[in-house]
Image: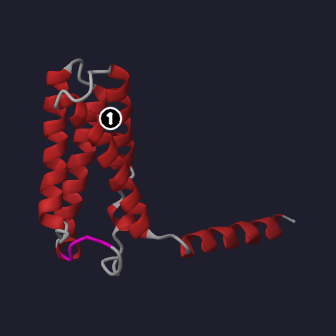
Amino acid sequence: MKKLLLAISLFALTASAATADPIADRQALMKANGKAAGQLAAIAKGEAPFDAAVVLAALTTINDDAQKLDVAALFPAGSDKGDTTASPKIWEDMAGFQAKADKFKTDAAAALAAPPADVDGVKATLGVLGQNCGGCHEMFRVKKG
């Protein structure tokens, strides 16, 4: 019975791994980060009032997604083909890309550990996180259009 359960478990794991889509997975992470950053940007621009709960939720999303940014799993060889704006530079400079991802993880965790207490703090935090996003997109993303 144990062998049957093990065989079924292994089959299920293999089947789910075979249907994994790293492009869709990384796009979902980026979309969620963009939405969360948009909430922070609205506060920073004065389009939305400062709300500590909204700021904390946005930073939690950004940090959770940053920590899920597993470069090897989300950017495997061959995943530069298809519906993606990932630049071939990622695979040419995987160490540089990994360094950018690691910095983003560190900065996102720091932002969540010490969330801003006012609009000026949101602006500063968004500036740091935005530099991560912008710097990576500048080097490792193909511009649309």
Q: Is residue 13 left or right of residue 141?
A: right
Percent position of residue 23, x then y: 39, 69
Q: Residue sitting at 27 percent across and 41 percent down?
A: 38
Judge whether 92 appears above or below 46 on screen.
below
Q: Is residue 13 left or right of residue 86?
A: right
Q: Is residue 83 left or right of residue 107?
A: right
Region rendered in magenta = 84-88
Judge whether 96 appears above or below 15 on screen.
above
* Amino acid type at mark 1: Leu
| Quadrant of the image occupied by residue 78 | bottom left
| Quadrant of the image occupied by residue 94 | bottom left
Q: Is residue 2 left or right of residue 116?
A: right
Q: Residue sitting at 25 percent across and 70 percent down?
A: 86
Judge whether 125 appears above or below 51 on screen.
below
Dot 1 surroundings within 10 Å: few (below 14), some, or many (20 or more)?
Answer: many
Specify the quadrant that holds the C terminus.
Answer: bottom left
| Residue at the extreme top | 117
Residue tagged by mark 1? 59
Q: Closer to the camera, 52 or 111?
A: 52
Q: Closer to the camera, 50 or 25?
A: 50
Percent position of residue 110, x then y: 25, 33
